[in-house]
Amino acid sequence: MVPVKRKELAKIQDKDEDEERKMRRKMQKAQSKRRIAEKRKIDQYGECIAGLITKTFKVKSSLHPSLPSRPKNKNKSTGDLLEGITLGSNQQPTTSKSPAPFAFSQRNSYSEDKLVVIESEAKDDNKRHSEKVAEEVAAMILSVPEYLFDANEDGCQGDGFPIDFTTIEKEATEENAAHIARIEADKKKQESEWNIGMRVFVPVRCRTEKCKKLGTKGTLVLVAGTKYCTVISGEGRFDLHCAAFKCSHCDGVMNAELEDYIGSGYWPGNPKTLGVFFTTSFLKLYFHLKNYLPGSSEYGLLKALGAFSADEGREHTISNAFSRASRMYYYVTHLVDRDIKKKRKLSCRACSNKCCAVHIDGNHKLVRRKSKLKQRIKQLYKKNELFFSQEELEKIATVVGKLKNKIKMDSVCGNSDFKAAKEVSTNRKNLATTGSVMMCCVHGCLLKGVDMTKGETYSHTLLLLEHIYGLQDADHANLFIVQDVSCKLDPWLKELARLDPGRFKALYEKTNFHLSRLHGQAHVWYCRVLNFGHWKEGACATLGEELEQLFSFFSRFGNCTKYMSEANRQEFLTEAAYHWNQRKEHKMAYFITQKFVTALSRGDFYKKRLTSILAEQKTSIEDLPSILVDIQDEARDYLKNHTQAASHLTDKQMELEKAYFELLNIKDIIACVAQSCKWRTKLRRTQTRLRAKAKALIVEINEIIAAMPKEKKIRPVNEKDFEAGIFPWDSNDHQSFKDKYKLIDCWMLWLRNMEPQEQSKKEM
């Protein structure tokens, strides 16, 4: 017999049960109708016979309630007579004493016809019921599948014998039971195979007590342990058995330990319970994800993993131990890199201990709001791992504070006043941290930083200077410090060295400040001549804006760090700094090569341009050093001897110069500091007012110049002078100075682009 599949047999049995239930209900209804009909017919038949007997014998029968007396015939009672007539007593032998022949010969024609009608109706009902039953039985036989038995049209099997449905049902039941037993056996076997343990590296030696006593080396085999655990990977959640090892020598089973899991790429959520594990590949993925996509949600990532697991039919709940496990994994990885691999993660491999230049600047977007909540997270990294602690900053600020009153300095370069730090510190009183001052090398690698609690001060820069000079070789003296206000920082440090030579004199002698190319444009002309970086030998075409590229990466973390605790913020930014330096190190060879190629192309460009300018001005290249000395001497004399006469014209001129430099500072604030649209809109309105003020001042100044005597008259001022920042009353307004400045500037750019060609070879 062909085996019956369990699902198909279940469908057939269900269908047969439904058909059998329907058939049973129909048969019950038919039997009930038949009993009612038979009872009705018997009652009608009895009434007819009783009427015949009453009319014939003139007696009263018990069948009729109105006939109290019995018939006179004592041999047969009325009940026997009725029974005989009902059951066909006309076939019984009759006697002369019997009243039956007489009764039938004299019966009423109406009653006889009535009996015939009743009998014919009963026969028709029986016939119809038999046909209906036959049709239902045939339908039941046709609904049975052909593979149960081979039947002919006459209801017999192929060999002609009648079908034994009981035997067929018994065989099918037995076959179905055997099939179910095989399914259960396969299920148990599959469940035993599903006891999958975590895949870990198998140790070399058995750690059981028996093997230790015997001193033998048994072969270990990886098996599934008795405990359950949860593994979280990049593909979601997996519920597995913990790993165990079975020894071939002592037959002992030992569970995997913490070292086995970590060595196999599983990081525990809790090292004591070993119930939840995260794959190290998934933790590395999240490390790169949160640094390449600032502001990405850890909670959203775990929810996405849970949804992925649910789509695959697995449990979707992800343990909340991920945050703690990831923090510990990143910190342990840092310790391995620092203490075992001896990596200097906050240094530049190309610069090593001989940096060409470093850039120091403040970022006012990495803020942290004040909070009354207590700090619940213990900081894993050292307090001075990336950022100097506030205690160290306070120490140097205390020393500077004692000498501050003895130093007469201002923040004005000519008529320009840099107000960025002041604006940030006064408008953000609800912040615990107003930003960070950072320092990077010319290759963009972050070296160190210090947080600001009030605003950017010289003390922050001084602390970073002491750190970078402590890392350099003793014989390396050609280190340039790029700062936006180097023209003020240099004389300030000089005064500190004079007042406290024991601490600051050696530092001042090593420092070599210069202005960045972009921020230097906001300084007055003599400041640019004396402090521009590309005008100083050995600067190697340092742009001085390398830190701005780093800030473009770190500023995106501002939305995350402003609500963090101090410890969490320190860890977050430290890991981001390591990630940034790692990216720079991976691209270092490409960066140095590109720098070398760029220096070659720019060197050729400025050489051709210099040749053109020399031919235009009819000057030789041998005359350029003397021209440079003349320009620098003129700038020093102007800085030393220039004083503004107290007059109405002078006041207007100074007011116009201040408006020009304030306009440049606002542009710088909009580009680097202003975060919100509201703040930038406010600053742009200030720009509009300054331009309108400048136009009014130009008109007033020209009116005063027009009224002056001819021998004292100067050229009138126009809007182009205001946009360029060079006014007619400046000593450098004459055409010869402008030509000299243009010539020397091109010469210096050519020389500075020749230097990186040799510097790149050393860095490689």
Image (cartoon, rainbow, N blue to C red):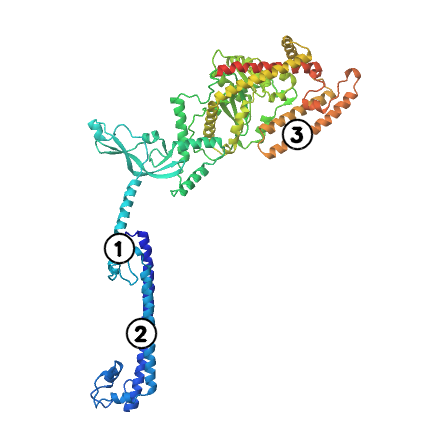
Residue behind mark 3 = 687
Q: Is residue 185 left or right of residue 347?
A: left
* Depth check, front residue: 436 or 8: 8
* The furthest residue to the front: 159
Q: Amino acid at mark 1?
A: Thr
Does label 3 or label 1 sit earlier along the sequence? Answer: 1
Nearer to us: label 2 or label 3: 2
Q: Residues within 10 Å of mark 2 (few under 14, many from 20)?
A: few
Q: Amino acid at mark 2?
A: Arg
**Residue drawn where x is 24% and y is 55% of the image:** 171
Q: Is residue 492 left or right of residue 129?
A: right
As helix, strand or loop, the secondary structure at mark 3 comes to helix
User: Residue 102's spot in the image, x, y percent?
Assistant: 26, 90
Residue behind mark 1 = 173
Figure disc tally? 3
User: Residue 170's spot in the image, x, y percent?
Assistant: 24, 57
Q: Amino acid at mark 3?
A: Gln
Residue at mark 2 to residue at mark 1: CA–CA distance? 37 Å
User: Residue 36's spot in the image, x, y percent?
Assistant: 33, 75
Question: Which corner quadrant of the image does residue 698 belong to?
Answer: top right
Residue behind mark 2 = 35
Mark 2–mark 1 CB contact (< 8 Å): no
* Depth check, front residue: 408 or 20: 20
